[in-house]
Amino acid sequence: MNAKTRAWRGGLAALLVLISSAGYADTATDAQVTVHADRPGAVIHREIYGQFAEQLGRGIYGGVWVGEDSPIPNIKGYRKDVVEALKAIKVPVIRWPGGCFADQYDWRDGIGPRDKRPVRMNASWGGEDSNQFGTHEFMDFAELIGAKTYLSINVGTGSPREMSQWIEYITADGHSSLASERRANGRDKPWKLDYVGIGNEMWGCGGSMRAQFYADVYRLYATFVHASVSAPIVRIASGANADDVGWTDAVMSIAGSQIDAISLHNYTIPTGNWTHKGSATQFGEGEWMSTLQGALHMDDLITKHSAVMDKYDPKKRVGLAVDEWGNWMDQDPGADQPALYQENSLRDALSAAITLDIFQAHADRVRMANIAQMVNVLQAMILTDKSKMVLTPTYYVFDMYKVFQGATSLPVDVQASAYRYGNASVPSVHATAGRDADGVVHVALVNLDPHHAETVHMTLSGVNESNVHGRVLTAPDISTINTFDQPDLVKPTAFGGATLKRGMVTAVLPPKSVVVLDLH
Ligand code: AHR
């Protein structure tokens, strides 16, 4: 059992104790939800809807980048279908090039004429990397889809000099030789670099460091992240794996004053066993339940890490960036499947929804989150196979929840009955709410019970709207997926199950569903 497994199991035990003490009734009763629109909370940073795109498998090659000469319709080498799909969900930020890949990446391999770039072994994930997708391709891609840029810096095998030269190459406006080199390579104006991550998983694939050692390394690198005052770069420290609050404590205590945000990584493994994680499609209700419990564990994790951060940063200047999260299942058994390719079912949609609910509940601390990963890797938004593309159930949750980007969070109380399976249980109903810039209140409601509809009675304090409409996402089975041949099996449809009378919404949530309501 590796460290991640131990951490997950410990956290799950804590979660079970926590949810058995309060929050929901044991017998099936209607759920009561109160939205406190009269007590607005923090702004929901758009960046919690961020994506992670690592140079591995078909995450980039074939998934995003096909090259200008490809028969697959493309915009300057980027798949047209994927670009349009990502634009539609308003991807706010993309993290690249890793992951573990980042700490062995030499940025100089990925600039200059493509036919002259070196082919390198992908030591982290197997196979080779042609470097056809490099700095220009990433920065232009982000610009094309309107996303902010987040680079993972090579700390494990790189140097502060390489980092500072990479940053200068990207951001310098004057006549330095690096700016001139960028121009010679086809980009006149500097790009906007929004975030840098100083290493990735430095306790593991990034260099097997101890927290105290890394904290000093962080200070060293952070000193050389130069940017103009008008375009500051947010510096993100490589944070903890799951429950390891000791890491957060040490890094915050030694380097906190130089940190703008610290990361947190957490994956849900349905079986809790990294050797046999569980199938993405062939699973029963036991792994439906354990996956949802794993997703709910995020609340406990954020609470614990945030409490440690409060010791050094009570005013919450430093953000928490959950820059890798999601479900990690066994790789698809297909013979020629690339690394970390997995199908995506209704289960992934519901676990994504409740995780996003948790991020929004912690909007005061969580400033960014990046689901792992964007295309063809782990809990992907999009799957591709040559010229075919399919949007996953997780994609549709991001589509439904995009109304919360930049909204003001509204506190929500939920009283719901338990959904039980065997000895395990979770509250059947989850909720989140926000008011957008136009004053529209949006409420997301999730019913985790795969067998029973849930009636929700929702009181809205401080809401005068009189119309309600929304969309619902559900499917015939807990493991239903969208396939290349049947891409619309799990797709949002208009929701007719809600009424609004005298300030009270009544909504009947179908079993295993996500509903997002708009109140006008
Ligand atoms: O997302 C896949 C891998 O998971 C990343 O490369 C690494 O950071 C994490 O362990």
Image (cartoon, helix red, strand yellow):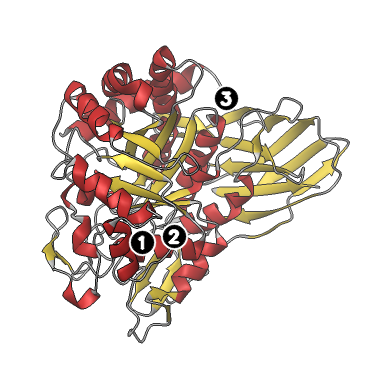
For mark 1, does the 10 Å Cα neighbourhood hold few (<14), some (14 to 19), or many (20 or more) residues?
A: many
Of discs 3 and 2, which sits in the foreground?
Answer: 2
Q: Compared with residue 324, is residue 461 higher up or lower down, i.e. above or below? A: above
Residue shown at 65%/48% (left/top)? 516
Q: Name the residue under label 2.
A: 142
Residue 456 placement: quadrant:
top right
Of 104 and 500, nearer the camera is 104
Q: In this view, does 416 lie to the left or right of 144?
A: right
Q: Can residue 247 be seen in this view?
A: yes
Q: Label 3, label 1: how many angstroms apart (C-alpha)?
A: 46 Å
Rendered position, 140 above or below 100: below
Question: Where residue 230 sits: x, y (%)?
Answer: 50, 42
Q: In this view, does 240 lie above or below 404?
A: above
Residue at x 80%, y 46% (from the top left corner): 499
CA gap, disc 3 to disc 2?
43 Å
Q: Which mark is residue 477?
A: none
**Crowding at label 3, few (<14), some or many (≥20) Cα neighbours within 10 Å?**
many
Q: What amino acid is at disc 2?
A: Ala
**Residue drawn 44% across the image and 53% down it:** 192
Three-letter amino acid code at the position of disc 3: Tyr
Lateral position of residue 449 relative to residue 469, left or right: left
Which residue occupies the foreground of this view, 58 or 394? 58
Could you tell me which secondary element the residue under label 3 belongs to?
strand
Which image quadrant for residue 218?
top left
Badge 3 is on which residue? 24
Q: Which of marks 3 and 1 is nearer the N terminus?
A: 3
Q: What residue type is labelled 1?
A: Phe
- Residue under label 1, please give it: 138
Res. 37 image quadrant = top right
